Amino acid sequence: MALKVELRPVLADAALWLVSGAVLVGLSVLLVDQPISTWSHDVLHRPPLAVDITLIANWKFPVCAASLVILAAFAASIAGRPIGPLWRTAIAASIATFLATLAVAFVKHGFGREWPETWVNNNPSWISNHAYGFYPLHGGEGYESFPSGHTARTTAPFAVLWHRLPKLRVLWVLPTLIIAAALVAADFHFVGDCIGGAYLGVACAAAVLLFMD
């Protein structure tokens, strides 16, 4: 019975998070995504700086960084050094990164959203032929726009830091905002994709903190 009582606030927060995310993504899909993508394509013309910024959140860099943290923590433990609060925070952030990377692959397949522009194998896109929609479980690289993996992988570790090191919260929110802005400016993702990625990243961080807090 005690376990059920403890789970109630967790489930309530999860439900609120899910509903708020669905509302924001839905509004973006209906009202924002198409005009912003068109504006980005016609006006910004994929600025090189935005493209370069997005490379930071490519899956290789976050996953490699998280792996190094885990290996360093393991080595420190083998050497008999205590794993203090900062180490535990770094480990939690790394695990959240792994979890977000894995979750993104499944969620993308589940939603099957078309991209803003054509990237691979002449995939249908909003800019190329006004293809705009979701095709759940469709599969294929041309249907992996939602959610943004870059945003999810960036948000997950920094959401852990947001919780564990609250005095620096202004600093922890900046990476997600910068990556999302770069993705939209380069027309790599719709605004709704970035919102969904941020929500997924926070959800992954919350799941890790639930067991490591």
Image (cartoon, helix red, strand yellow):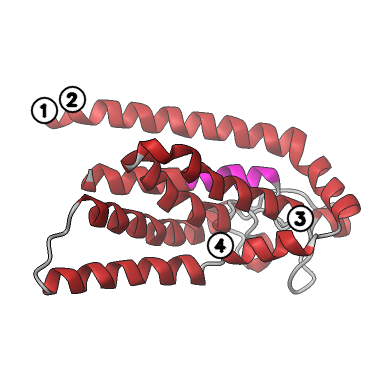
Amino acid at pointer 3: Asp
The numbered disc on residue 50 is none
Q: Earlier in the sequence, mark 4 or mark 1?
A: 1
Earlier in the chain: of badge 3 and badge 4, it is: 4
Is the Cβ of the residue at disc 2 closer than 8 Å to that at disc 1? yes
- In what quadrant of the picture does the C terminus appear? top left
Q: Quick check: 205 left or right of 210?
A: right
Q: Nearer the viewer, mark 4 or mark 2?
A: 4
Residue 163 coordinates in the image, percent (x, y): 35, 39
- Residue at 18% across, 54% down: 84
For the residue marked with disc 1, what is the amino acid?
A: Ala
Is 175 left, or right, of 80 in this rendering? right
Could you tell me which secondary element the residue under label 3 belongs to? loop
Q: Position of residue 29 (x, y in %)?
A: 70, 39
N-terminal-most mark, 3 or 1? 1
Labels in figure, total: 4
Q: Is residue 47 magenta?
A: no
> Could you tell me how far apart the alpha carbons at marks 3 and 4 are, in whole angstroms?
15 Å
Q: Which mark is residue 57?
A: 4
CA–CA distance between discs 4 and 2?
A: 38 Å
Q: Residue at x 56, y 34 (%)?
A: 22
C-alpha separation, residue under disc 3 versus residue under disc 1:
49 Å
Residue located beneath label 3 in the image: 187
Residue position for label 2:
5
Q: Secondary structure at mark 1?
A: helix
Q: Main secondary structure of the magenta part?
A: helix
**Mark 4: which amino acid?**
Ala
Q: Which residues fall within the magenta stretch?
A: 191-200
Q: Nearer the viewer, mark 3 or mark 1?
A: 3
Q: Which residue is mark 1?
A: 2
Looking at the rendered structure, the secondary structure element under dot 2 is: helix
